[in-house]
Every structure is written in C-alpha cells, then in structure tokens.
Amino acid sequence: MKVIFIIDSLQQGGAEQSLYHLIRHFPSPEKVTVVYLYPKESLKLAFESTGCKLICLQVNKKMRWIDGIQKLKKIVKEEKPNVMVSCLYESNIISRLVSKMTNIPLIGSLVSDSYSEMRTVTFGMKRKIGGLFFYYLDVLTASIPKMWIANSEFIKQSNAKKLNIPLNKIQVVYRGRAADEIKAWTRPEHNEAFHFACVGRLLETKGLNELIHSISQLNEKGFNTKLDLYGDGPYANTLKKLVDKLGVSTQVIFHGNTPNAWEKLYQANAFVFPSWYEGFSGALVEAMMVGLPILASNIPMNLEAIEDNATAFVFKVNHGEDLFEKMKQLQLDYNSSLILGINARKIALERFDIKHISNQYWLLLIKFDKKDI
C-alpha cells in the first residue's frame, strides 16, 4: 500500500508534529509520501529522519488553488498512491478536487473545532464574510472524502454537524506520543519562583491574555510566580506589549519556537493550558506523560484527556478570574496537585502511547484500501 499525506507546511504546529510522530512509528514509513504546499520547513529534518519521501509543491500563494491543484495532480499521477490523506484547510480543499479528478480515494482529517463561536469571536467583519465563503466551500466539497479521521470524539460530533458528514464515515484516532521516550517528571528543587509552563502557538484564542493577567495578579498578591511561554505566533507582539504594560517582563519569559518543547517541562512546577478551543492537543498529552501538575481550560477536547481533581485542575474557559483562582489554588495545594500529575501520567501512558495510536491509524488505512470500510 502506498499513501500520500497532503499538508499545508512542515512548521511547528500541532497537526504537523502529530503527523511526524505517526509516520515515524508506522510499520512501513518508506511507503509514505508527504506532500506540503509551502516551504515552511522547521520540521523537515524530523520528517526526513522517518524515512518517508518529502515533496514541497512551492505553491504560488496568489494562485494557490489553481497552482496547488495542478501541481498535486501531477504528483498523484507520478506516485500512483492507493490512498491520499489530507490535513488542514488549504490541503483539504485542493486534495478533494484532485481526488475527484484522478479517482484516487481520499481520507479527510478533522483536527479542530474550526467553526466554533470561540474561534470566530475575534474575527472582524471582513474576515467573517471571507470565513463564510471558505465555510461553504468546505461544506460543498466535504462529500468527496470516502472516510474521515477525527482526533477526538467532540471534534467528530462538531464537524459532522457543521459539514453534514455522516457519523459512520468518521473514525476517532487520538493524538499520541512516544511513551518510552518520556521519563517521569520530578519536582525541580532549584526553582526560587514557581514556574508555570505553557506550550503552543501565540494566538489570542490560546487564552494567553487572561494567563498573563493572572500572573500579574499572583505577583501582586505576594506569590513569586513566573510563566515560561514556548512557541511563537502572530499574537506575540500584542502579548509582549501587555507584559510591558503590566510590568511583568521579568515574570513572563518568551522562549519562542522550541523543538521538543515538552523537554522543558522538567524545569517547570506546573503546566498551564488556557485555550479557548483546540483539536486534541498533543502538548496536553505530552504534559500528561511527563507527569507534572496540570491546569487546563474546561473545553470538551481537553476533558476527553483529563478529569478535574483526578488528573488535573480545570477552570472555566475564557474566565480570567477563575484561572487566577485555580492558579493560586494549585500553588497553595501543591502536594495534592503532585498526585494528580502522577495519575495523569499513568492514564496517558495507557491511552496515548504512539505505538498503539500509529498502529490503529495504519490498520484503518489498510482496511480502507481493502474497501472494508
């Protein structure tokens, strides 16, 4: 069986990293070709190490639909795959049209709650109008994939409703990580301050505005608390201005894009994850496997991985005051939070080991190719 994965780029995003982890644990990565639209390639070396084939289409951004379709169609005819798998919006649309033209079956990926109110709340009117066009384009072409793979049950249910996809066409495969490569966290004794770590792209919808305000409040209340942000994104400058305005430039540290950012969690006292919406977060899975205390928003995707007061502390999404109170509680009741971290690691090692996840994914591809689905 020969598989082509189509994705927008190889940059440091959740979908890209999860695809990398999947492929490197497939039984036959040499049968996989990864085609990406744009030369954003911070993960290129990682993908090359898996043994898969990489092809960058170098799509012209201004003519991306026409150029992307023409170039992908050519690659598909040359590679002759048994099946294509697309991931992320532009790759999804282009792949669907190429699948229609070439009769190569396509599997779609559902990796986020793309049309949630929480995601669109920050859009201006012009972007909302443009968003409607892309939404209807998504709906009109959503019937082309023969099967879909969603990274959580909530993402399955939400997208099935929004895109009119029959539920029986969607399989759920959670994101996973290499359990045997992630050692158990131990409490760092060298920290003078209490360090919260947050990993992810710097976007407004990641809840970072409320998080920085909470750090400021904690220090005003006499807590010696710091925040380590691992990631970059379009909201970075806004956040840095907020940090300066609140006078917490020594308490909030911007580390930028950090390969294998989970390795930095061993230096932290706790992991905080305040996103307004997600897919199924690989960063959260990594934090669970590391085993440090976790504080996360109560969005449905997070609650498929963690349980309040059992494996993590949970707070109300987009609720700065509740976030502040739970961050305070975690520090005051730290011994209890250590137990939750141990519980989280145990659950994650059982549910999200990449060897199990990648095998589940590969078996779906094989069954699909045999027309058993």
Image (cartoon, grey):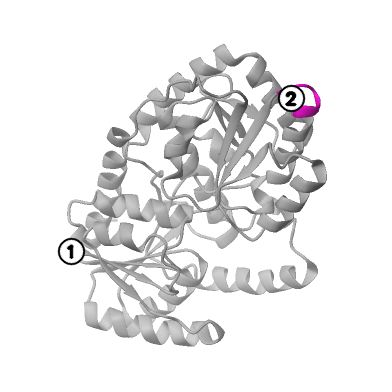
261 or 164: which is nearer to us? 261
231 or 174: which is nearer to us? 231
Magenta: predominant secondary structure element?
loop
Magenta-drawn segment = 219-223
Q: Secondary structure at mark 2?
A: helix
Q: Residue at x 42, y 38 (%)?
A: 263
Residue to which mark 1 is pinned: 1
Mark 1 and mark 2: span between their CA atoms?
53 Å
Residue to which mark 2 is pinned: 325
Q: Which mark is residue 362?
A: none
Q: Tell me if residue 361 comes above or below residue 100 in the rendering.
A: above
Q: Residue at x 46, y 38 (%)?
A: 264
Q: Tell me if residue 268 comes above or below residue 255 in the rendering.
A: above
- Pinpoint residue 347: horizontal percent, then vertical percent: 40, 26
Label 1 amino acid?
Answer: Met
251 or 139: which is nearer to us? 251
